Image (tube, helix red, strand yellow):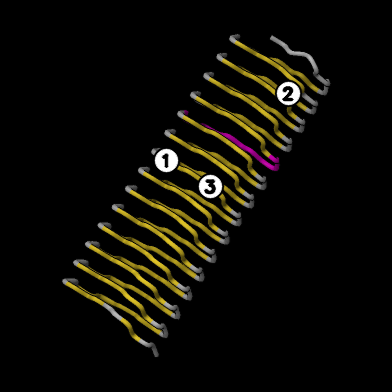
């Protein structure tokens, strides 16, 4: 039940191919060993599978525009109920990729050993995942505008139910980052080994975390305006339920700082070995150094 336009199967060992109820326009399968390919109920426009060993590819109920799978061993790719516009999967050994119920505009996955990526129920606008061994990334129920994940060994990143505007994660060994239920405006995490960062239920405006090995930072239920944490080995910092206006913590070995339920206007803590500072419910309008 299809109007067939162009299928090439060249120099491949075929094990299971289903082509059902679609107006097919262009499929190339070249120099590949095919194990399981389902193409069901879609108006197909362009799929190239070149020099790859294919193990399981499902493309179901979508208006497909452009998929390139080049020089890769594919293990499990699901593309379901989406209007696909541009997906590049290049020079990677793919292990599990789910793309479900989204209007995809631009996703690049290049030169990485992919282990688990879930992209569900989002209007995707620009994601770059480049030169990294990916271990667990969830992007769920968000209108994504700009996400760069570059040259890092990713261990656990959750981005859930947020209107994302600008997130850079660059050259870091990421261990646990939760970004939940917030409209994100500018977050830079650069050249650090991250151990535990929670950013929850806040409208984030400017947070820089640069060149530090982070051990425990909680930023919870606050409208954040300007926080710089630079060149410090951070051990325990709680910033809770405050309208933050300017906090600089620079070049210090921080051991325990609590800033709770205060309207902060300017606090400088510079070049000191801090062991325990509690500031609870004052209205600070004076710098401390």
Q: Which residue is mark 3?
A: 146
Residue 261 drawn above or below residue 186: above
- Per the rendered image, the range of residues in magenta is 192-203
User: How many angstroms separate mark 2 from mark 3 (CA)?
Assistant: 31 Å
Q: Secondary structure at mark 2?
A: strand
Measuring from the top left, give residue 27's x and y in whole percent.
31, 74
The residue at the point 21 percent across, 68 percent down is: 30
Q: CA distance from mark 1 to mark 3?
A: 13 Å
Tell me which label, 2 or 1, sits earlier in the chain. Answer: 1
Q: Which mark is residue 259?
A: 2
Residue in view at x 65 percent, y 26 percent: 227
Q: Position of residue 241 (x, y in %)?
A: 76, 33
Q: Residue at x 28, y 78 (%)?
A: 7
State the quadrant of the N terminus: bottom left
Please identify, in this view, whether the residue under mark 2 or under mark 3 is nearer the observer: 3
Q: Are marks 1 and 3 in contact (CB under 8 Å)?
A: no
The residue drawn where x is 57% and y is 59% is: 122
Which mark, by number, is residue 164? none
Is residue 194 located in the magenta-colored stretch of the structure?
Answer: yes
Q: Is residue 151 magenta?
A: no
Q: Count numbered badges in the picture.
A: 3
Q: Where residue 150 is drawn, which disc sits there?
A: 1
State how far apart marks 2 and 1 are (Cα).
33 Å
């Amino acid at each position: 039940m299809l109007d067939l336009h162009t299928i090439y199967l060249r120099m491949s060992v075929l094990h299971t191919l289903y082509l059902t109820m679609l107006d097919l326009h262009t499929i190339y399968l070249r120099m590949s060993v095919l194990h399981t390919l389902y193409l069901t109920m879609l108006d197909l426009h362009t799929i190239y599978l070149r020099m790859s060993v294919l193990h399981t590819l499902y493309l179901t109920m979508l208006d497909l525009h452009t998929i390139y799978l080049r020089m890769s061993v594919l293990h499990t790719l699901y593309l379901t109920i989406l209007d696909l516009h541009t997906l590049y999967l290049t020079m990677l050994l793919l292990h599990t990729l789910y793309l479900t119920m989204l209007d995809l505009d631009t996703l690049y996955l290049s030169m990485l050993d992919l282990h688990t990526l879930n992209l569900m129920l989002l209007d995707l606008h620009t994601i770059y995942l480049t030169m990294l061994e990916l271990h667990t990334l969830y992007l769920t129920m968000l209108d994504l505008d700009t996400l760069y994940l570059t040259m890092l060994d990713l261990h656990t990143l959750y981005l859930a139910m947020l209107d994302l505007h600008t997130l850079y994660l660059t050259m870091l060994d990421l261990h646990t980052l939760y970004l939940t239920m917030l409209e994100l405006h500018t977050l830079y995490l650069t050249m650090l080994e991250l151990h535990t960062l929670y950013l929850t239920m806040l409208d984030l405006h400017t947070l820089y975390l640069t060149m530090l090995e982070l051990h425990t930072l909680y930023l919870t239920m606050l409208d954040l305006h300007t926080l710089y944490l630079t060149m410090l080995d951070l051990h325990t910092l709680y910033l809770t339920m405050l309208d933050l206006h300017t906090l600089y913590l620079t070049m210090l070995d921080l051991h325990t700082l609590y800033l709770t339920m205060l309207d902060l206007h300017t606090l400088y803590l510079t070049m000191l070995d801090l062991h325990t500072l509690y500031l609870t419910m004052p209205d600070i309008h004076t710098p401390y150094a």
